[in-house]
Amino acid sequence: MYVKICGLQTAETVAAAVDAGANAVGFVFAPGSARTIGAELARELGSAVPADVETVGVFRNQPIDEVLDIARAASLTTVQLHGKETLADIVRVREAGFRTLRAFSAASYAALSTEEKLAWESERILLDAVEPGAGVAFDAGLIDGGAPEGFWLLAGGLNPDNVAQLAAALRPDGVDVSSGVESSRGVKDVGLIRSFISAARSAG
């Protein structure tokens, strides 16, 4: 089970995620979030992350030139696009040397045509709630028509108490959490990070 801990802002929480076995740590660059940080801090935090752990930057409806500038300045390995970005945008980011993740709300993914879903099949995608980072789970019924065929992450409303059950039921390749490991909005809790990763791995 691939595990991504997102919205990190301190060396202590990055270290906790890595030490507990996270596959990826995420830094938010989308404006307006309680978890948004700058490229310089992200670069500093990421410098302590082992090469086999992805450092992911989360962007939302920002110009791709800006995304790439920040990603380079922060020394990220991976760019996650979480808005209305196109497949062409993803390809451009990858051609610039970054791994990619494309986030969809469960509703927007369900609304894609069969042809559109096929076009995304070879990409790594993430299915989230309607409002990212709000701690509200998406309606699992929205993917009754079929989960993504390729690599996909489950996000939205996950926490140490429900991640094993939801992961076992929906069978994603991995899980992504932010608010579910916080003691208050935007403030990560080391104990919750460890508990979440342990619970997620118990699901497979």
Image (cartoon, rainbow, N blue to C red):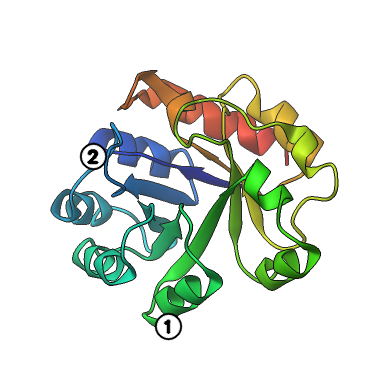
Asked whether residue 72 appears in the rendered view, the answer is yes
Q: Secondary structure at mark 2?
A: helix
Give the x, y percent position of residue 133: 44, 33
Give the x, y percent position of residue 73: 19, 65
Residue behind mark 1:
95
Q: Quadrant of the C terminus?
A: top right
Which residue type carries mark 1? Glu
Who's the residue at 42% across and 83% down the image?
95
Which residue type carries mark 2? Ala
Whether the residues at callouts 2 and 1 have beta carbons within 8 Å, the answer is no
Of residues 145 and 12, which is closer to you in this image?
145
Q: Earlier in the sequence, mark 2 or mark 1?
A: 2
Give the x, y percent position of residue 163: 64, 29
Question: Which mark, residue 61?
Answer: none
Who's the residue at 32% across and 40% down the image?
15
Asked whether residue 168 appears in the rendered view, the answer is no
Who's the residue at 47% across and 63% down the image?
85
Who's the residue at 71% across and 57% down the image?
112
- Neighbourhood count class around disc 2 (C-alpha, 10 Å): few under 14, some 14–19, many 20 upward: some
Quadrant hosting residue 191: top left
Of residues 17 and 180, which is closer to you in this image?
180
Residue behind mark 2:
11
